[in-house]
Image (cartoon, rainbow, N blue to C red):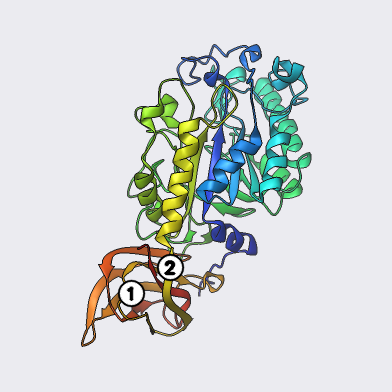
Amino acid sequence: MSVKVLPSAQHLEWADQEIGVIIHQDLQVYEHGYYFRDNWDYTPSPEVFNPSELNTDQWLEAAVNLGARYAVLVAKHCSGFSLWPTKAHDYSVASSPWKNGKGDVVAEFIKSCHKYGVKPGIYASCCNNAKYKFGWGRLIDGPDPARHRAYIDMMKTQLTELWSNYGELFEVWFDGGFPEDGGDEIVELLCKLQPQAIAFQGDPRRHHCVRWVGNERAVAPYPCHGAANEMGAFDGETEFELQPCFYGSLKGKFWMPGEADMPNRDQWAACQGGWFWRPGEDHTLYPPEYLLERYFTSVGRNCNFLLGMVIDNRGLVPDADFEQFKRTGDLIRNAFKTRLGGCSGKGFELEFEVPDGAKTTLISLSEEISKGENVTCFTVYGFDGEHYRFVATGSSIGHKHLIPVEPCSFRKWKVVVHENIQGEIPEFRDFSAYSSL
């Protein structure tokens, strides 16, 4: 008989954060037209990096306005340029004119996270590094054991710096996973230096892992279970649909819920998938109403919502983006403006009343996932004074399942569980009705 997989304490804390941001700043912001995928033989000079107004407090203010509770800084993207003064090489802020080579963006970011009460995370690309012609986990220009070994040692030096010098991290990102022939060493390093961190695309046998959902549109599949058997393919460009790993499984071997990421600018029209700033592209910003929908297709489908944040060549969140984050956060908060009523507890049926005449616009359901996911089929009904009327049905709840509804004045709400894991009594952490009106 298989043992039911359960989330760790770190997974439970991560799920409760619900919203995060991932912050991109690399040399293509300062040298327009540079793209590592198009030319592995060229990288810009570090001297182009010279933001005149870099202010990480402003970044975190934008994140808080959105409602983000954690933030992931891309400390090194795929150019290989490092936003901290690494001792591994000279392709970093230490060789730039910014702050006369004495600056450290990572240190400033961590300090701002603590100031604003946001949990800090770090992305450092291991599998791609144009400066060293290392792409998709191996050398671009062919096998060379000595160069490959040197690259892995360099990455271990950098990761040791990032995971040792800036305090405890909430999340680390492995964009594309681990390098070939060296990944196990990085796994061991993470276990040693940041054992409590959530790892995106990490090793679920050793870490508190979360997984990709198959696209960069923050549209999780449904159902999207917290447990799964494998991470799934990921190269940062290609979308993958209908693979079992993205849906997860109630019988999955590892607890590794989905993190649904997307850029805040149009991924088809804006610079390099919408992740980086380029002048004249404010028109590519997604409308806040669209981002609200993506909140429902991520957090509302048992995932976390990770929204991209571009930083411009001043070193700031652009004015239009700053306003977009605030307006999106206002819309999300307004969706939960008034809690009309709710309940919690064990059972196959739960019911609660709302005030007479109150108009419900959102139903929220949450299982007590510390005991795992159990529900596999449920229906929500509203009581009109005479009969219970069908409102919605679903096949997964997990940490949170959100059901937006047209304004309705049902006096009571009821959830009925039709199917669940055999032998388990469903336990609801919350079943509530909200009004945005």
Contact, mark 1 vs mark 2 (Cβ under 8 Å): yes
Task: Provide the secondary structure element on which disc 2 rests.
Answer: strand
- The one of 340 and 109 positioned closer to us in this rendering: 340
Gap between marks 1 and 2, in whole Å?
Answer: 10 Å
x and y, in percent, of residue 342 in the image: 43, 77
Q: Is residue 298 visible?
A: no
- The one of 282 and 74 positioned closer to us in this rendering: 282
Q: Residues within 10 Å of mark 1 (few under 14, many from 20)?
A: some
Q: Quadrant of the C terminus?
A: bottom left
Q: Residue at x 47, y 50 (%)?
A: 329
x and y, in percent, of residue 289 in the image: 35, 47
Determine which quarter of the picture holds residue 390.
bottom left
Amino acid of disc 2:
Thr
Determine which residue is flagged by label 2.
338
Q: Is residue 233 left or right of residue 207?
A: left
Determine which residue is flagged by label 1.
358
Image height check: is 35 above or below 288? above
Q: Is residue 56 visible?
A: yes
Determine which quarter of the picture holds residue 420.
bottom left
Q: Residue at x 28, y 78 (%)?
A: 410
